[in-house]
Amino acid sequence: QARVEQMRPAPGSANFEALQKNYQDVQTAANAIREQRKKDPAGYVMATNAEVAEAWKNFDPKNPATAKAAIGETVFAQKSIGIPSDRIAPLPAQQAESVAAIINDTEQPVDARTQTLVGMIGITGDEDQQQAIFNQLSKAGVSDKTALVFDAYMRGDVGAARRLFEAATVKAENMPGKAQRAPGFEDAVSDAMFGAGTAGEVFYSLDLHDPATTAIAQRDYELVKTAATLAMAAGKDQDEAIDQASKDVHGPVIRVNEMLSVDGNVRGVVPEGTD
Protein backbone atom coordinates (compact mmCIF):
# COMPACT_ATOMS: atom_id res chain seq x y z
CA GLN A 1 0.00 0.00 0.00
CA ALA A 2 2.86 2.38 0.80
CA ARG A 3 4.32 1.90 -2.69
CA VAL A 4 0.94 2.65 -4.24
CA GLU A 5 0.60 5.83 -2.20
CA GLN A 6 3.97 7.01 -3.45
CA MET A 7 2.38 7.19 -6.90
CA ARG A 8 -0.30 9.64 -5.79
CA PRO A 9 0.38 12.88 -7.73
CA ALA A 10 0.48 16.19 -5.91
CA PRO A 11 -2.20 18.70 -6.94
CA GLY A 12 -0.87 21.00 -9.63
CA SER A 13 1.70 18.49 -10.87
CA ALA A 14 2.48 18.44 -14.56
CA ASN A 15 0.26 15.89 -16.33
CA PHE A 16 -1.79 15.64 -13.13
CA GLU A 17 -4.85 14.07 -14.79
CA ALA A 18 -2.84 11.32 -16.47
CA LEU A 19 -0.85 10.64 -13.31
CA GLN A 20 -4.05 10.61 -11.21
CA LYS A 21 -5.68 8.09 -13.55
CA ASN A 22 -2.60 5.90 -13.44
CA TYR A 23 -2.59 6.08 -9.63
CA GLN A 24 -6.27 5.15 -9.45
CA ASP A 25 -5.77 2.22 -11.83
CA VAL A 26 -2.86 0.91 -9.75
CA GLN A 27 -4.84 1.40 -6.55
CA THR A 28 -7.79 -0.54 -8.00
CA ALA A 29 -5.50 -3.38 -9.05
CA ALA A 30 -3.80 -3.44 -5.63
CA ASN A 31 -7.18 -3.56 -3.87
CA ALA A 32 -8.25 -6.47 -6.08
CA ILE A 33 -5.08 -8.38 -5.21
CA ARG A 34 -5.57 -7.74 -1.49
CA GLU A 35 -9.15 -8.94 -1.70
CA GLN A 36 -8.15 -12.09 -3.60
CA ARG A 37 -5.38 -12.85 -1.12
CA LYS A 38 -7.83 -12.38 1.74
CA LYS A 39 -10.69 -14.38 0.21
CA ASP A 40 -8.71 -17.28 -1.28
CA PRO A 41 -4.99 -17.07 -0.43
CA ALA A 42 -4.27 -20.57 -1.70
CA GLY A 43 -6.07 -19.82 -4.95
CA TYR A 44 -4.06 -16.61 -5.27
CA VAL A 45 -0.69 -18.36 -5.04
CA MET A 46 -1.91 -21.08 -7.41
CA ALA A 47 -2.76 -18.37 -9.95
CA THR A 48 0.51 -16.48 -9.53
CA ASN A 49 3.07 -19.19 -8.73
CA ALA A 50 3.90 -21.67 -11.50
CA GLU A 51 5.25 -24.27 -9.07
CA VAL A 52 2.05 -24.24 -7.02
CA ALA A 53 -0.09 -24.44 -10.15
CA GLU A 54 1.95 -27.41 -11.41
CA ALA A 55 1.64 -29.17 -8.05
CA TRP A 56 -2.17 -29.08 -8.24
CA LYS A 57 -2.40 -30.40 -11.82
CA ASN A 58 -2.65 -34.04 -10.80
CA PHE A 59 -4.96 -33.52 -7.83
CA ASP A 60 -7.88 -35.95 -7.70
CA PRO A 61 -10.51 -34.99 -5.11
CA LYS A 62 -11.48 -38.65 -4.81
CA ASN A 63 -7.91 -39.43 -3.74
CA PRO A 64 -6.78 -37.00 -1.01
CA ALA A 65 -3.24 -38.42 -1.08
CA THR A 66 -2.73 -36.59 -4.38
CA ALA A 67 -2.93 -33.29 -2.49
CA LYS A 68 -0.02 -33.90 -0.13
CA ALA A 69 2.81 -32.35 -2.15
CA ALA A 70 0.57 -29.58 -3.47
CA ILE A 71 -0.44 -28.55 0.04
CA GLY A 72 3.21 -28.28 1.02
CA GLU A 73 3.94 -26.03 -1.96
CA THR A 74 0.81 -23.97 -1.34
CA VAL A 75 1.50 -23.34 2.33
CA PHE A 76 5.15 -22.48 1.64
CA ALA A 77 4.16 -20.03 -1.12
CA GLN A 78 1.70 -18.25 1.17
CA LYS A 79 4.27 -17.91 3.92
CA SER A 80 6.79 -16.51 1.44
CA ILE A 81 4.50 -13.62 0.48
CA GLY A 82 3.61 -12.77 4.05
CA ILE A 83 0.16 -14.33 4.46
CA PRO A 84 -0.43 -14.37 8.26
CA SER A 85 -0.22 -17.85 9.76
CA ASP A 86 -3.82 -17.74 11.01
CA ARG A 87 -5.07 -17.05 7.47
CA ILE A 88 -3.04 -19.64 5.56
CA ALA A 89 -5.30 -21.97 3.58
CA PRO A 90 -3.90 -25.39 2.59
CA LEU A 91 -6.47 -25.80 -0.21
CA PRO A 92 -7.45 -23.42 -3.00
CA ALA A 93 -11.19 -22.69 -2.73
CA GLN A 94 -11.98 -24.53 -5.97
CA GLN A 95 -10.24 -27.69 -4.75
CA ALA A 96 -11.95 -27.47 -1.35
CA GLU A 97 -15.31 -27.23 -3.10
CA SER A 98 -14.55 -30.28 -5.27
CA VAL A 99 -13.73 -32.35 -2.17
CA ALA A 100 -16.83 -31.08 -0.37
CA ALA A 101 -18.99 -32.10 -3.33
CA ILE A 102 -17.76 -35.70 -3.02
CA ILE A 103 -18.27 -35.76 0.76
CA ASN A 104 -21.81 -34.45 0.34
CA ASP A 105 -22.74 -36.76 -2.55
CA THR A 106 -25.37 -39.00 -0.96
CA GLU A 107 -25.40 -41.18 -4.08
CA GLN A 108 -21.94 -42.44 -3.14
CA PRO A 109 -21.22 -45.10 -0.46
CA VAL A 110 -20.91 -43.79 3.09
CA ASP A 111 -17.56 -45.54 3.58
CA ALA A 112 -16.03 -43.86 0.52
CA ARG A 113 -17.29 -40.43 1.58
CA THR A 114 -16.01 -40.95 5.12
CA GLN A 115 -12.58 -41.91 3.79
CA THR A 116 -12.51 -38.80 1.61
CA LEU A 117 -13.19 -36.62 4.66
CA VAL A 118 -10.70 -38.20 7.03
CA GLY A 119 -8.14 -38.65 4.26
CA MET A 120 -8.28 -34.99 3.31
CA ILE A 121 -7.99 -33.70 6.86
CA GLY A 122 -5.35 -36.26 7.78
CA ILE A 123 -3.19 -35.60 4.72
CA THR A 124 -1.02 -33.44 6.97
CA GLY A 125 0.19 -34.13 10.48
CA ASP A 126 0.12 -30.42 11.33
CA GLU A 127 -2.89 -29.88 13.61
CA ASP A 128 -3.24 -26.23 12.59
CA GLN A 129 -3.37 -27.26 8.94
CA GLN A 130 -5.83 -30.04 9.75
CA GLN A 131 -8.13 -27.49 11.39
CA ALA A 132 -7.68 -25.11 8.46
CA ILE A 133 -8.62 -27.85 5.98
CA PHE A 134 -11.71 -28.74 8.00
CA ASN A 135 -12.69 -25.06 8.16
CA GLN A 136 -12.34 -24.82 4.39
CA LEU A 137 -14.46 -27.92 3.84
CA SER A 138 -17.07 -26.58 6.26
CA LYS A 139 -17.12 -23.27 4.40
CA ALA A 140 -17.60 -25.25 1.17
CA GLY A 141 -20.72 -26.91 2.57
CA VAL A 142 -19.60 -29.91 4.64
CA SER A 143 -21.52 -30.18 7.92
CA ASP A 144 -19.59 -28.88 10.93
CA LYS A 145 -20.80 -31.99 12.79
CA THR A 146 -18.29 -34.02 10.80
CA ALA A 147 -15.51 -32.58 12.99
CA LEU A 148 -16.22 -35.47 15.35
CA VAL A 149 -15.75 -38.00 12.55
CA PHE A 150 -12.05 -37.23 12.28
CA ASP A 151 -11.65 -37.38 16.07
CA ALA A 152 -13.18 -40.87 16.15
CA TYR A 153 -11.04 -42.03 13.24
CA MET A 154 -7.84 -40.77 14.84
CA ARG A 155 -8.52 -42.67 18.06
CA GLY A 156 -8.86 -45.82 15.95
CA ASP A 157 -12.62 -46.25 16.14
CA VAL A 158 -13.50 -46.63 12.47
CA GLY A 159 -16.99 -47.86 13.31
CA ALA A 160 -17.74 -44.74 15.34
CA ALA A 161 -16.33 -42.57 12.55
CA ARG A 162 -18.64 -44.19 10.02
CA ARG A 163 -21.70 -43.94 12.26
CA LEU A 164 -21.02 -40.30 13.08
CA PHE A 165 -20.43 -39.45 9.43
CA GLU A 166 -23.73 -40.99 8.45
CA ALA A 167 -25.51 -39.12 11.24
CA ALA A 168 -23.80 -35.83 10.35
CA THR A 169 -24.70 -36.00 6.67
CA VAL A 170 -28.09 -37.73 6.49
CA LYS A 171 -30.89 -35.51 5.29
CA ALA A 172 -33.65 -35.05 7.84
CA GLU A 173 -36.35 -36.06 5.37
CA ASN A 174 -34.51 -39.31 4.64
CA MET A 175 -33.77 -40.29 8.25
CA PRO A 176 -35.33 -43.59 9.30
CA GLY A 177 -36.16 -44.43 12.90
CA LYS A 178 -37.97 -41.28 14.02
CA ALA A 179 -41.15 -43.23 14.67
CA GLN A 180 -39.23 -45.45 17.10
CA ARG A 181 -38.37 -42.58 19.44
CA ALA A 182 -40.16 -43.24 22.70
CA PRO A 183 -41.55 -40.44 24.90
CA GLY A 184 -38.70 -38.77 26.74
CA PHE A 185 -36.17 -39.52 23.97
CA GLU A 186 -34.69 -36.03 23.94
CA ASP A 187 -34.46 -35.90 27.74
CA ALA A 188 -32.68 -39.25 27.70
CA VAL A 189 -30.15 -37.94 25.18
CA SER A 190 -29.61 -34.81 27.29
CA ASP A 191 -29.06 -36.89 30.42
CA ALA A 192 -26.56 -39.14 28.63
CA MET A 193 -24.69 -36.14 27.25
CA PHE A 194 -24.74 -33.65 30.11
CA GLY A 195 -26.21 -35.36 33.18
CA ALA A 196 -24.61 -35.35 36.60
CA GLY A 197 -21.67 -37.72 36.75
CA THR A 198 -21.21 -38.01 32.99
CA ALA A 199 -18.03 -37.24 31.09
CA GLY A 200 -20.02 -34.69 29.11
CA GLU A 201 -20.82 -32.73 32.26
CA VAL A 202 -17.10 -32.04 32.56
CA PHE A 203 -16.24 -31.90 28.86
CA TYR A 204 -18.79 -29.17 28.08
CA SER A 205 -18.88 -27.50 31.52
CA LEU A 206 -22.17 -25.85 30.67
CA ASP A 207 -22.27 -24.33 34.15
CA LEU A 208 -19.60 -21.88 32.94
CA HIS A 209 -22.04 -20.47 30.33
CA ASP A 210 -19.37 -20.04 27.67
CA PRO A 211 -21.12 -19.27 24.33
CA ALA A 212 -18.57 -21.17 22.22
CA THR A 213 -18.75 -24.30 24.37
CA THR A 214 -22.54 -24.09 24.49
CA ALA A 215 -22.63 -24.04 20.68
CA ILE A 216 -20.42 -27.14 20.53
CA ALA A 217 -22.64 -28.88 23.08
CA GLN A 218 -25.74 -28.11 21.00
CA ARG A 219 -24.02 -29.40 17.86
CA ASP A 220 -23.02 -32.64 19.57
CA TYR A 221 -26.45 -33.08 21.16
CA GLU A 222 -28.14 -32.88 17.76
CA LEU A 223 -25.61 -35.32 16.32
CA VAL A 224 -26.22 -37.84 19.11
CA LYS A 225 -29.98 -37.58 18.59
CA THR A 226 -29.56 -38.40 14.91
CA ALA A 227 -26.98 -41.16 15.48
CA ALA A 228 -29.18 -42.78 18.12
CA THR A 229 -32.21 -42.60 15.84
CA LEU A 230 -30.29 -44.31 13.03
CA ALA A 231 -29.10 -46.97 15.49
CA MET A 232 -32.69 -47.64 16.53
CA ALA A 233 -33.66 -47.99 12.88
CA ALA A 234 -30.90 -50.62 12.64
CA GLY A 235 -32.39 -52.61 15.51
CA LYS A 236 -31.00 -51.27 18.78
CA ASP A 237 -33.30 -50.35 21.64
CA GLN A 238 -33.45 -46.70 22.65
CA ASP A 239 -31.18 -46.84 25.72
CA GLU A 240 -28.54 -48.89 23.90
CA ALA A 241 -28.69 -46.60 20.87
CA ILE A 242 -28.24 -43.44 22.95
CA ASP A 243 -25.38 -44.99 24.92
CA GLN A 244 -23.59 -46.01 21.72
CA ALA A 245 -24.06 -42.61 20.09
CA SER A 246 -22.80 -40.67 23.10
CA LYS A 247 -19.75 -42.95 23.36
CA ASP A 248 -19.11 -42.48 19.64
CA VAL A 249 -18.96 -38.73 20.23
CA HIS A 250 -16.81 -38.71 23.36
CA GLY A 251 -14.83 -41.89 22.89
CA PRO A 252 -14.23 -44.45 25.63
CA VAL A 253 -13.56 -41.96 28.42
CA ILE A 254 -14.30 -41.91 32.12
CA ARG A 255 -14.88 -39.01 34.44
CA VAL A 256 -12.42 -38.45 37.27
CA ASN A 257 -12.48 -36.14 40.30
CA GLU A 258 -9.13 -35.42 41.90
CA MET A 259 -8.92 -33.53 45.18
CA LEU A 260 -6.24 -30.89 44.88
CA SER A 261 -6.87 -28.78 47.94
CA VAL A 262 -9.31 -28.11 50.72
CA ASP A 263 -11.03 -25.64 48.39
CA GLY A 264 -12.51 -28.22 46.01
CA ASN A 265 -12.01 -30.61 43.14
CA VAL A 266 -10.51 -30.44 39.67
CA ARG A 267 -12.70 -32.40 37.30
CA GLY A 268 -11.56 -34.02 34.10
CA VAL A 269 -12.10 -36.81 31.60
CA VAL A 270 -9.47 -39.36 30.58
CA PRO A 271 -9.45 -42.37 28.24
CA GLU A 272 -10.57 -45.64 29.76
CA GLY A 273 -7.64 -47.66 31.06
CA THR A 274 -5.65 -44.60 32.12
CA ASP A 275 -3.99 -45.03 35.52
Image (cartoon, rainbow, N blue to C red):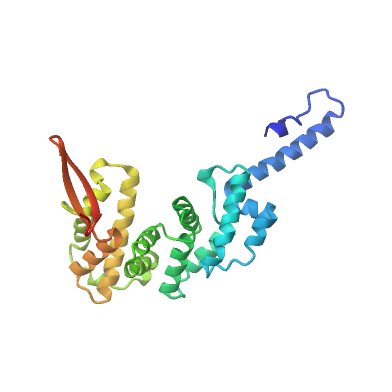
Instruction: Answer with the quarter of the image where residue 259 lies.
Output: top left
Q: Is residue 176 above or below residue 51?
A: below
Task: Tell me, yes or no, if residue 40 can be seen here.
Answer: no
Quarter of the image where the N terminus is located: top right
The residue most toward the front is 275
Q: Give the number of callouts.
A: 0
Instruction: Answer with the quarter of the image where residue 247 lies.
Output: bottom left
The answer to whether residue 61 is left or right of residue 257 is right
Task: Write the residue at 39% across / 61% down.
Answer: 150
The residue most toward the left is 262
The residue most toward the right is 14
Name the spot of residue 99 as percent of width and height, x first: 52, 64
Q: Is residue 135 above or below residue 232?
A: above
In the image shown, does 173 or 19 lie closer to the viewer? 19
Task: Tell me, yes or no, if residue 123 can be seen here.
Answer: yes
In the image shown, does 168 or 59 lie closer to the viewer? 59
Name the spot of residue 263 as percent of width and height, x first: 15, 34
Name the spot of residue 181 as percent of width and height, x first: 22, 68
Name the spot of residue 147 as percent of width and height, x first: 39, 58
Quarter of the image where the C terminus is located: bottom left
In the image shown, does 141 or 116 lie closer to the viewer? 116
The answer to whether residue 195 is left or right of residue 214 is left
The answer to whether residue 142 is left or right of residue 40 is left
The answer to whether residue 212 is left or right of residue 52 is left
Task: Write the residue at 46% across / 65% down.
Answer: 119
